[in-house]
Image: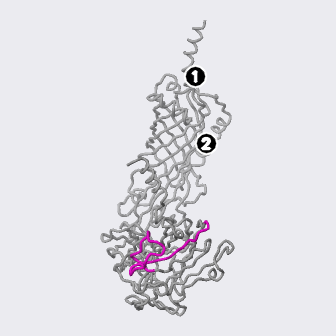
Amino acid sequence: MKRLVVLLACLLAPAAAHAESPKNVNLEFKVATWYVPAVDSGTFAINPATASPYTPYDDVFGGGSFLLFQARADYLFYSGVFGTAAGGGGLGYGQKSGHGYLSDGVTRATDSTTLHQLPLDFGVLYAYDWLAHNYSIPVVPYGRFDFVYDFWWFTNGVGDTSSYDAPDGTSSDGYGGTWGYRLAGGVRLLLDVFAPAMARTFDVDFGVNNSYLLVEYVWSKVDDFGSSKSIRLGDEGYVNFGLAFEF
Amino acid sequence: MSARRLLLWTLVVLWSPAAWAEIPGFTISKIEGLNGVELDDDRFATTPSATNWPAHKVNYRDCLAYLGISEGQSLAEPDAEGAEVVEADVVEADVVETVEVTDAASTDVPADAATETATDAGTDGAGGGGGDTAEGIRKISIEWSVANPSLAGRKWWYSIRTGTGCSESAEVDAEATETCTYLRQKTELVGYELYTLEIPVTRLLGTECTKGSTGDARVYFTVQAESNFNERDTDTVTVDYDYDPPKAVQTPTLEAGETNLQASWTDESNTEDVTYTVYWSPDTFDDDTLSNVESKGDLTAKDYQITGLENGTRYWVAVAALDDFDNPSTLTDRVDGTPVEVTDGFEFYKNAGGTDKGGFGCAMGDTGAASAAVLLLVALALLATFAGARRPATRRGA
């Protein structure tokens, strides 16, 4: 009988040692690559020099992508056999600089001009992580949906926020915010599987239950839900890379 | 070496403090210029609370101002007595020292000595070498004290010297030399007092300002216990001077922008740390008219964007380097540039027919309204789910 008690104690001890701290929050740090705001997809006047519509983003900023750095926090409100569901929000920042034009409209100025974007988002996340946590399959597919409010502003050559005075006397501010939404799908690689001892230490010392590398494909439409009077800042296809931690 | 001898050596070493250690509790409480000398406290720290304390720097322009002379001038040489003689009465000419008793009861000093001990002399300018103003000889006053001399029933002495040949290890009554003269001969230290030492500027800076010269002038304060060689400490106040300006930088180039000019330059001549000052004006200018010109200093980069200009107006721009004594180099050649109108990103967007008016008003309308309403409903549903959800207390993990 005494031996049986000792045997049971030995079997149960490792499980007790590996007990995790409570898990409530998902924290992500990621960077968007290949993000190109869809400014030029709006309706613009015909450029007499090319006989095709102006493409302001391309003409001033040279087109191309820029890095959009983002941080996000989600509250985990379900975790079980069906995976994990969470809701939360985040913010990001990115900018693209180019050079303005002299009054002839052709010659590039030495003055720089910059488009700044600071997207705020809030939405939900779903990840199927049950297999990862129970069968050590380190790949976690997930998807998310977010509403986005994208603050934007242009600055001129001296760093001041731009403004525009039309010939008819009306003026426009070179800053604003545009609503939209964003869908993303991707996979997370659970790092704990590769270094379980380190993962346990991370949990004991900092309360981090799980650490992931992530890659996600993003589709976004940021144009005040189809308004023709708004600058378009969505992008129908870019990729985020980042790290995620569950606390 | 026997153990006894070793022990004796150890005791001797431990017993003898460094002969030229700093004076315990020695404090300079204030330095000020007298008789027309206005110390520039950007460089010449005047109180211990100054951020640049204890730096006392004098540049070429300061030197001219402190001596009260113009470029190329020099003051009369000190007369023979003042320059050569090391006898106390003469050497102390022009050096006036007062003692204010802050706690007379705590000292044994006779009342007359406590109110003012002055070596007279010198208000007639003898030995001062010039620098006189209507108010008198140009001087610098140093207010100092020894906060806690351990009098312990013994007499303590102090003396004050200056010169290139002074030694910090010299005794309080060491013989004066040609290169180390007394500002104050051996005098009894009365204790917790505030002393004021007035030094003619010429005793520190000489009688002229020679471009290209650098160095320092030191005032040595020595305190020594009566009949005890080892109980002697010296503190110094150092005035650094540098009359060697940096080299001029290369003439800047200008790039015109909207209400701005971007100036950039190279500097391959100066190896020491320098900062740059950019000057600009709609009118041309030179070294003598810089006070009427707008400028931006303390630049470490070799470019600067001049902003706040008027489009279409021609501006002249020049650059000077400054060393850490704020000696300026000669100005570069003046170059001109004219700010021009530039269409920035947002203006281009609007000119091209962009319809966003900016601001934070709601632009949802036309085709967007329906989608917005649907998405808002979805958001509310999600929030409701979120608010009502109850999750397990613990999770399974890795």
Q: Quadrant of residue B260?
A: bottom left
CA distance separating discs 1 and 2? 48 Å
Q: Considering only vertical position in the picture, is B168 above or below B127? A: above
Residue B86's x, y, as percent?
43, 84
Q: Which residues are magenta?
A: B152-181
Q: Nearer the viewer, residue A238 or B157?
A: B157
Determine whether label 1 and label 2 are within 8 Å by CB: no
Element at label 1: helix
Q: Chain of mark 2?
A: B
Say which residue appears at 52% left-offset and 43% top-offset. Answer: A182
Q: Amino acid at mark 1?
A: Ala
Q: Is residue B228 magenta?
A: no
Q: Which residue is mark 1?
A: A16
**Is residue B339 visible to us here?**
no
Mark 2, secondary structure of its residue: helix
Q: Is residue B71 left or right of residue A220?
A: left
In the picture provided, is B305 more to the left or to the right than A76?
Answer: left
Mark 1 or mark 2, which is nearer to you? 1
- Chain at tag 1: A
Please name the residue that numbered disc 2 is placed on: B374
Secondary structure mostly taken by the magenta-highlighted segment of the chain: loop
Classify 10 Å Cα crowding around label 2: few (below 14), some (14-19), many (20 and above): few
Residue at 50% in and 79% down: B185
